[in-house]
Image (spheres, helix red, strand yellow):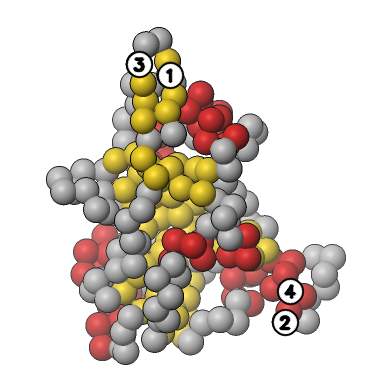
Amino acid sequence: MQQHQQQQTIALEAFEASLRGTNMLWYLLDQRTIYPPGFTDQIFADGVPFSRRILIIGPQTPPGWKLADDFDLIFRCQTGVEWSVLLTYITNAPKPILAICAPFCTPPSNFLQRVPITTTLVAFAYMNQTASQLSIQNYSSILLPPLSLDNISSISFPNHLGIPNPSWNQNSVLRDLHGAGASLVVSSVGDRTLQKQYYWYYTSKNQHGAWTLQQIQSILGTLSSQV
C-alpha cells in the first residue's frame, strides 16, 4: 500500500512473518469483542495445533472472558509468585502452547523476557489503556484493531504503539488502510535489525476469528442473550 503526500511516497509492506513463538499486544475496540477479526489468520495460519491453550486472567478481567470454553487451563495471576508458577508450567508443559492474557491482566516484564519460544503469547488490551499500564516496549509486535473513521483520530502512535509519531500524515494513511479493510502492525518479527517496522494486515479475511460476548453467552446458555 502506498500513500503519496507532498512528493513523498510512503510504502507499507504486508505483514507476512509468523507470529507463532512470539509475544504480542493486540488491541480490542471494546469489551463486546473477545477475539478480534484477523486473529485466526495470524495465529492459526500454519495449521499446527497447540498442545495447550491457556487463558490468563486477573482481578479486573471482564466477566465475558471467563465464559470462554476453548482453553485447557485458566490461570489467575496477580502476584509475582503466581506469574512464577505459570512460567514453571509453561516451561514444562507439552508444546507448543498458546497463552492468552485477557484485558487488564498485563504480564510483568521479567515474565515476558523468560517465556520460551515454544509459547505464543497474546496479550489483549483496550484502546483506552495507557502505554505505562501495558508495558508495550516488551512486546515484539503490536496490532491495532479494525480501523474505523471514528477511532482513527484517537490513535496515538507514542501511547498505543510505543513509537514516535511518524513523519507522514498518520490519519491519512490510517484512512487508506480502513478503506482497504486493513489495519496497522508494528513489529520487529522478521526484521534483521530487530527494529520495529510498520506493516499492514487484513482484519476481515477470516471473520470467524471474531468472537463476541453475545456469541459466547449463546453457546454456553449461561446468560441471557440480551445482556
> How busy is the neighbourhood of tag 3: few (under 14 within 10 Å), some, or many (20 plus)?
few
For marks 3 and 2, give the one nearer the viewer. 3
Kindly give the residue lying farthest to the left in the view shown: 193
- Secondary structure type for disc 3: strand
Residue at numbered disc 4: 217
Q: Residue at x 80, y 65 (%)?
A: 227
Could you tell me if residue 91 is visible in this image?
Answer: yes
For marks 1 and 4, give the one nearer the viewer. 1
Q: Quadrant of residue 196?
A: top left
- Secondary structure type for disc 4: helix
User: Are circles 2 and 4 on residues that touch, CB within 8 Å?
Assistant: yes
> How busy is the neighbourhood of tag 1: few (under 14 within 10 Å), some, or many (20 plus)?
few
Which residue is at the front of the view, 9 or 69?
9
> How busy is the neighbourhood of tag 4: few (under 14 within 10 Å), some, or many (20 plus)?
some
Q: How far apart are marks 3 and 2 (CA)?
A: 52 Å
Q: Residue at x 44, y 34 (%)?
A: 1
User: Are circles 1 and 3 on residues that touch, CB within 8 Å?
Assistant: yes
User: Are circles 3 and 2 on residues that touch, CB within 8 Å?
Assistant: no
Residue at numbered disc 3: 8
Q: What residue type is labelled 2?
A: Leu
> How busy is the neighbourhood of tag 2: few (under 14 within 10 Å), some, or many (20 plus)?
few
Q: How far apart are marks 2 and 4 (CA)?
A: 5 Å
Which residue is at the front of the view, 87 or 19?
19
Image coords of residue 90 (percent x, y) = 30, 81
Image coords of residue 97 (percent x, y) = 36, 79
- Secondary structure type for disc 2: helix
Q: In which quarter of the image is residue 69?
A: bottom right
Q: Distance between the residues labelled 2 and 1?
A: 49 Å
Vertically, is 156 above or below 130?
A: above
Q: What residue type is labelled 1?
A: His
Residue at numbered disc 2: 220
